[in-house]
Image: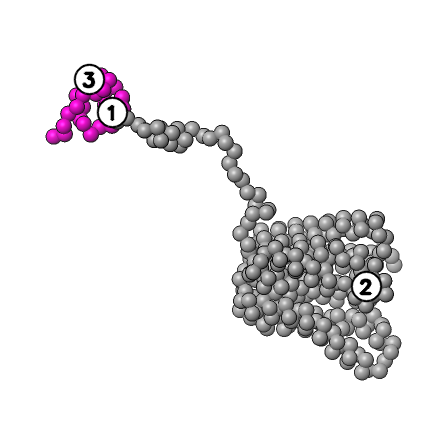
Amino acid sequence: MNEKTKCKKCGLEIDSDLNYCPYCGTPQVEETKDDSAQQVNESTPSNEPKERSIKFFSFESKAADINIFKSIAFFVIGLLGLNLLAYIFSAIAKSLDNQYFLVSINSNAAINFALYLLLLGIILIVANKDLAKCFAAFKKSKTWIQGLAFGFLLMIVSAALNSVIQLIFPTGQNNNETGLDSITDVYPLLSLFIFGLVGPFVEEFTYRIGLFGTIKKWNKIAAYLGTALVFGLIHFDFGASNLAVEFANLPSYVISGLLLCYFYDYGGFEVSFLAHATNNFVAVGIQIILKFLTF
C-alpha cells in the first residue's frame, strides 16, 4: 500500500505520491519559479513579435547540383565556343568571295542561327544525364507560373530602366539590338525560334549553370555580381563606332543578368529559362507584329 500523508490544505489523508489532492485540488509539490514561468509561457501566447523571414530574400537555393567540371565546361562552350565558332563561320563566309553576302543581313542571320543551333547540340551532348536535373520541375504548374511571372517582371524592369537611361542619354539601341532587329525583320519565324527559345536555353546553361554555378561554390555574392557583369559585357560591342551607346545600354543588361541569377537561384533552371525565354519571345513577337502592321 502507498504511504499516506495529509493534504496541506484540507487535511484529509491522501497517497503520498500524488501531486494534487483528489478532494480539494491543492498542489502537494511546490512548483519552482522556472517551472511556473515555463507553464505560463506554454499556456499564454507571447506578445513579443516573432521573427519572420521574407521568402523572397530567404530561401533554399534550387540551383542545379551539377559537377563543377561540367559547370566550367558549359561556360567555356557558351562563351569561348561562341567566339571561336563565330570566327570560323566568318572565315567560311569570307572564303565565298562574295562581298555583298558578307555585309548582308543574310550572312549575319546565317552565322547567328548556325551558332546557336550548334551550341545547343554541343550543350545537350555534354549535359547528357544532367538534363533530367534541369527539366525535373517542368511538369509542375508552379514552375510555369513563376517562370512567366518573372519573365514579365524582367521585361518591366528592363523597359523602365531603358526609359530612364534614354531620358538621360538619348542614344538609342546598341549594335546587338540593332543587329537582332534587322535579322528578325527578314526572318521573323526563325528569329522567334532561335532568339526566343534556343538563345535563352544556351545562355542559361552558359551563364547560370556554368558561370554562376561555378563561382557560387566559393562565394554567392561574387557569383551574382560576376555573372551579371559578364552577361552585360557579352552584349557589349567593343568594336562599335559609338561606344557611348554601348555604355548607355550596358546597365540594362547587367540588371537583367542579376535578375536571371536570382530567378535561377530561387526557382532553378526551369524558372530562369522560362523567364529569359518569355522576355525574348515577347520582345521578338512584338517586333514581328509591329512589322506586319506597318504593311
The first of marks 3 and 2 along the sequence is 3
Task: Please state if 124 lies on the left or on the right of 187 as rendered.
Answer: left
The label number, if any, that marks residue 152 in the structure image: none
Magenta stretch holds residue 70 = no
- Residue carrying label 1: 28
In this rendering, is residue 245 above or below 55?
Answer: below
Residue 292 visible in the displayed image: no
Quarter of the image for residue 84 reads bottom right
What amino acid is at disc 1? Answer: Gln
Q: Are marks 3 and 2 in contact (CB under 8 Å)?
A: no
User: Magenta part of the protein: which range?
Assistant: 1-27
Around disc 3, counting alpha carbons within 10 Å, would you say few (fewer than 14), some (14 to 19), or many (20 or more)? few
Residue 152 spot, x, y in % from top left:
70, 51
The label number, if any, that marks residue 11 in the structure image: 3
What amino acid is at disc 2? Answer: Asn
Residue 237 visible in the displayed image: yes
The first of marks 1 and 2 along the sequence is 1
Name which residue lies at 58% across and 72% down. 126
In this rendering, is residue 141 above or below 18?
Answer: below
- Residue carrying label 2: 175
Task: Please state if 295 lies on the left or on the right of 91 as rendered.
Answer: right
Name which residue lies at 72% across and 49% down. 157
Q: Secondary structure at mark 2?
A: helix
What amino acid is at disc 3? Answer: Gly
Task: Please state if 274 lies on the left or on the right of 235 as rendered.
Answer: left
Q: Main secondary structure of the magenta part?
A: loop
Quadrant placement of the N terminus? top left
The first of marks 1 and 3 along the sequence is 3
Q: Secondary structure at mark 3?
A: loop
